[in-house]
Amino acid sequence: MSDREYFGTDGIRGKVGTNPITPDFILKLGWAAGKVLSRHGSRKIIIGKDTRISGYMLESALAAGLASAGLSTYFTGPPIPTPAIAYLTRSFRAAAGIVISASHNLFYDNGVKFFSNYGTKLPKSVEEDIESKMKQSLICVNSSSLGKTSRINDAARRYIKFCKSTFSSDLSLKGLKIIVDCANGATHHIAPNVLCELGAIVIPISITPNGTNINKKCGTTDIRHLKTCVIKQKADIGLSFDGDGDRVIMVDHLGNKVDGDQILYIIIREKMRKNQFYGGAVGTIMSNIGLELALKKLKIPFERTQVGDCYILEKLKELGWHVGAENSGHIILLDKTTTGDGIIAALQVLTAMVNNHVSLYHLCRNITLLPQILINVSITGNSNPLKSIKVCKISKQVKNILADHGRVLLRKSGTERLIRIMVEGENKQKITILAKRIANAVKIANF
C-alpha cells in the first residue's frame, strides 16, 4: 500500500480554501516538486489550468514555489485542456507539466495534476518523493538561481494543430452537423475550432466560462441539454467534454447516450477494419460487461483494472497494448498520444463515421450494454462505511439476488468524499431498487 497522504488517483484534489488546496500548501508543493523534478535535467515546467476562478490564485502560488526551487515556468495563458499540457511538455522538452484542474468536479473544487517529461502521469515513486520533500523546510535558492516565468503565446494553436494531425488529411467532416458541449471549461476555445477547421458544421454550447459555471448542468456528467440540442437541431452527433477536456461522452442523432465503453468498442472495430489493431483492450472494474462480451465476439483480449486512468496506463504498458478506457469517458489511445484526450478520441469516432458513411447509432449496433445504476453517497471526514457490518451484509444479499446475472461494486472515490455504488443487471427497475437499498445502508453507516 502507498503511504501517500495527498496524491490520489489523479493528482491532488480538494475543496478550495481547505487543506491541501490552499495558497500556502500549493506554494510549498511547487517548491517540493521543483526540487524533485529538477533531477531530470531540464529546468522548464509547463503550467496550464482550466476555467475555475481559483486557478489564477493557485497558478501564482505554484509558480512562486517552483521559482524558489530554481525552476522556470512557462504559462500557457488562457485555460487549456489537460491533454494539451501533456503534449506541450513533450514538445518543449520540459522537466514536467502541471495542470491546475479538478476535472469534472464543480468550481469550488480544484487540484494539481502532474505529467512527466514524457507526457505521462508521474510514477507513484516520484509522487512519494514530492510528499517526502514537503515535510522539509522550504529553503529558497540564491537570488541568482531563482526561476523565471514566461508565456507560450501560441499554446492553443499548437495543440489544435496536434489534434488535427490525428485525423487523416484524406478525410473531411464536411456535411456533418455537430453539437459540442464544452462544459464551460478548458475546451471552449479549442474543440469547436478543431472541428470547424476539419469542415464540420459546429454548434457549440456551454462555451461562456465565468469562473464558477464549469461542469454546472453541462459536460460529461450532465448531458441532458446536449441531448435536447442534438434532437432540436437535427444534428448528426453530440460531443460532450468535461471541464479539463480529458473525457468525452457522445450522443447519437436520436439522443442516445454513447459512453466510454461504446466509444472504445467503436475505435477498436475501426482499427480492426483497417488492420491497425493488435493486442487487447483495458477497462476498469466499472466497465460494462456488455463491452467485455462484445470484444469477446471479436476475439479481443480484455483486462480490467482499478478505477483511474493511471491504472489503465500501467496495465497497457505492462501488456504492450495501446487502447483502454473508462466508461466515464477517459479514452486512452497510446498510438495517438500519451494520456486520455477527449478531442482526439472524438476524432477517431468521427473517422469511423466518415470512412463507413454511417451514423453513430449504426456504429453502436454490435455492442449491447447491460443497465447500470450508479449512486454516489457523500461521506464525512475519513469515515469508511464500506467497513460497516450492515453494509457488507446488505451488499452480500444483493449479490446473491443477482447471482450470475449481474454485478455489485462499492468503492470509495479517489478524488471526492464519496462512496460510489454500482449495480449492474438485466432488469433496470430491479437493479435500481437494489442499488437504493445499498445506498440507504451506506448513509446510515456514515452517521
Image (tube, rainbow, N blue to C red):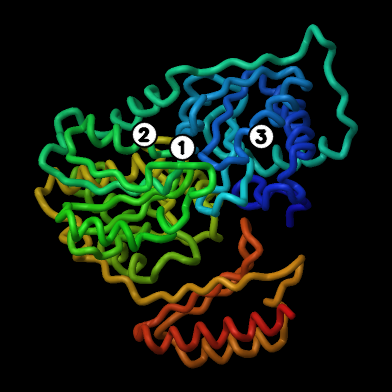
Give how far apart the Cα atoms at labels 3 and 1 are: 18 Å
| Closer to viewer: mark 3 or mark 1 | 3
| Residue 388 in view here | yes
User: Within 10 Å of the Cα at label 3, are there few (<14), some (14-19), or many (20+) other Cα atoms?
Assistant: few
Whichever of labels 1 and 2 marks the residue nearer the N terminus, that label is 1
Quadrant in which residue 307 is drawn = bottom right
Marker disc for residue 366? none
**Residue position marked by numbered label 1 in the rendering:** 81
Left or right placement of residue 34 versus residue 368 in this view: right
* Number of numbered discs: 3
Residue drawn at x 61%, y 70% as measured from the top left: 419
**Residue position marked by numbered label 3 in the rendering:** 57
Residue drawn at x 11%, y 48% as measured from the top left: 356
Residue 144 horizontal/vertical position (percent): 79, 7
Quadrant in which residue 298 is drawn = bottom left
What kind of residue is marked 3?
A: Met
| Front residue of 272 and 345 | 345
| Front residue of 15 and 278 | 15
Whether 234 is drawn above or below 288: the answer is: above
| Residue 4 in view here | no
> Do callouts 1 and 2 mark residues in contact (Cβ within 8 Å)?
yes
**Residue position marked by numbered label 2 in the rendering:** 190
Residue drawn at x 54%, y 17% as measured from the top left: 151
| Front residue of 388 and 39 | 388
Give how far apart the Cα atoms at labels 1 and 2 are: 8 Å
Secondary-structure class at tag 3: helix
Left or right placement of residue 199 versus residue 285 in this view: left
Quadrant in which residue 426 is drawn = bottom left
Left or right placement of residue 346 versus residue 212 in this view: left
Residue 183 horizontal/vertical position (percent): 42, 48
